Image (cartoon, rainbow, N blue to C red):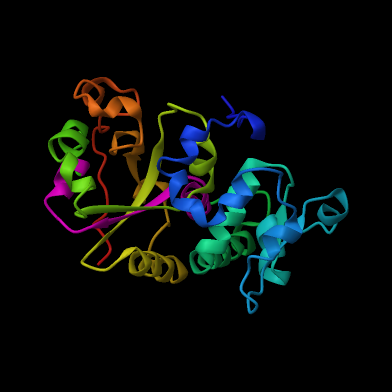
C-alpha cells in the first residue's frame, strides 16, 4: 500500500525529537512552520554547488528528459513543492551531495545502456538505496554474524549496548525513510551498506560514495542488507521491552540461501 505522509500541521512533534528526524535539526526551520519554497531550499546550497532545486511543473517536464538525466545535464533537481518526500530528498542532497552525485552518475549510465523505459538490476539497487538506504559504520566485526543470520534478538537486544557505545553507528541516507518516520510508531526497515573500521560517519559516507562512483557496489538489490531500524534504541517506544525483539513484524527470518557481501573496508 502506498504510503501517505501526514499533513504538515498534523505531524506529531514527538517524531521530530527522536531518531532519525532529530538528526536533521540544522534544517529544523524547513520542517516546521510554512512549507519552504525552492528559493528557500536553494539558499542553503554552498556558493560553488552546481545543482539547484527547480519546481516540478508541466513546463519543466515538457523538456522530455528523465529526472536523472536533467540533473546530470544541468544540475536541475525537479522538486514538488509542499511535498514531504521531495523536501527530504532536498535535505539529503544538501547533506550528502557527493553520494547523491555518484548515484546520479550511475543511474544516467544505466539509462544510456538500457534506454529510459527499462530498468536494470543496478538501477533497482541504486533506487532502493536512494529511497531507503542507510550506512552502518561497524567497529565490532563480531556483530556482523548476528546480522548475517537475522538474529534480531541478538543484534538489537543482547547487543543493545552496541548501538549506544559506538560499535554500531548509523547514517540515514534514504529520503523515503525520513518521510515514513513522520508517522509515529511506524516500523521502519532500511537497506544497508556496511563500512568497517575506526573512521567517523563522514569517512564512511565518503567511502560509500567512492564505491558507488566506480561501480564497486549497488550492482544488484541483493547486495543491500535489511536493517530493522525500529529495533535501535529510541527509534520505537516499544523496543525497550525484550518481547518486541521476538515478535515485531519488522523482524523477518533470513530466506534460505540468502547471503550478504562483506563490509567495505
Q: Quadrant of residue 69?
A: bottom right
Residue 132 in magenta? yes
**Above or below, 210 relative to 48:** above
For the C terminus, which image quadrant? bottom left
Task: Examine the rendering and report whether any part of residue 212 can be seen.
Answer: yes
Q: Residue at x 25, y 44 (%)?
A: 259
Q: Residue furthest right?
A: 59
Task: Examine the rendering and report whether any part of residue 7 can be seen.
Answer: no
Side (left or right) of 214 relative to 26: left
Q: Residue furthest bottom?
A: 48
Q: Residue at x 30, y 23 (%)?
A: 248
Q: Please tell me whether the stretch drawn in magenta is mainly helix, strand or loop.
A: helix
Magenta residues (range): 121-147
Please provide percent x and percent y for residue 47. 65, 77
Near-viewer residue (164 or 115): 164
Q: Quadrant of residue 105?
A: bottom right
Amino acid at each position: 500500500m502506498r504510503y501517505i505522509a501526514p499533513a504538515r500541521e498534523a505531524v506529531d512533534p514527538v517524531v521530530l525529537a527522536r531518531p532519525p528526524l532529530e538528526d536533521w535539526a540544522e534544517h529544523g526551520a524547513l520542517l516546521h512552520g510554512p512549507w519552504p519554497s525552492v528559493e528557500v531550499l536553494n539558499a542553503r546550497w554552498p556558493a560553488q554547488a552546481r545543482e539547484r532545486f527547480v519546481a516540478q511543473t508541466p513546463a519543466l517536464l515538457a523538456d522530455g528528459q528523465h529526472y536523472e538525466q536533467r540533473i546530470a545535464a544541468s544540475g536541475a533537481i525537479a522538486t514538488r513543492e509542499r511535498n514531504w518526500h521531495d523536501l527530504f530528498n532536498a535535505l539529503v542532497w544538501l547533506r550528502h551531495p557527493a553520494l547523491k552525485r555518484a548515484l546520479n552518475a550511475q543511474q544516467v549510465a544505466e539509462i544510456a545502456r538500457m534506454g529510459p523505459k527499462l530498468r536494470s538490476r543496478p538501477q533497482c539497487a541504486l533506487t532502493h538505496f536512494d529511497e531507503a538506504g542507510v550506512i552502518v559504520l561497524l567497529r565490532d566485526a563480531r556483530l556482523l554474524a548476528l546480522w548475517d543470520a537475522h538474529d534480531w534478538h541478538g543484534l538489537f537486544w543482547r547487543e543493545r549496548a552496541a548501538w549506544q557505545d559506538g560499535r554500531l553507528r548509523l547514517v540515514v541516507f534514504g529520503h523515503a525513510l525520513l518521510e515514513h518516520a513522520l508517522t509515529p510508531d511506524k516500523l521502519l526497515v532500511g537497506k544497508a551498506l556496511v563500512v568497517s573500521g575506526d573512521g567517523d560517519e563522514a569517512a564512511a559516507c565518503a567511502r560509500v560514495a567512492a564505491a558507488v562512483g566506480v561501480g564497486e557496489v549497488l550492482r544488484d538489490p541483493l547486495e543491500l542488507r535489511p536493517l530493522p531500524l525500529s529495533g535501535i534504541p529510541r527509534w520505537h517506544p516499544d523496543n525497550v521491552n525484550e518481547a518486541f525483539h521476538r515478535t515485531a513484524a519488522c523482524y523477518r527470518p533470513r530466506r534460505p540461501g540468502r547471503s550478504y557481501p562483506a563490509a567495505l573496508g
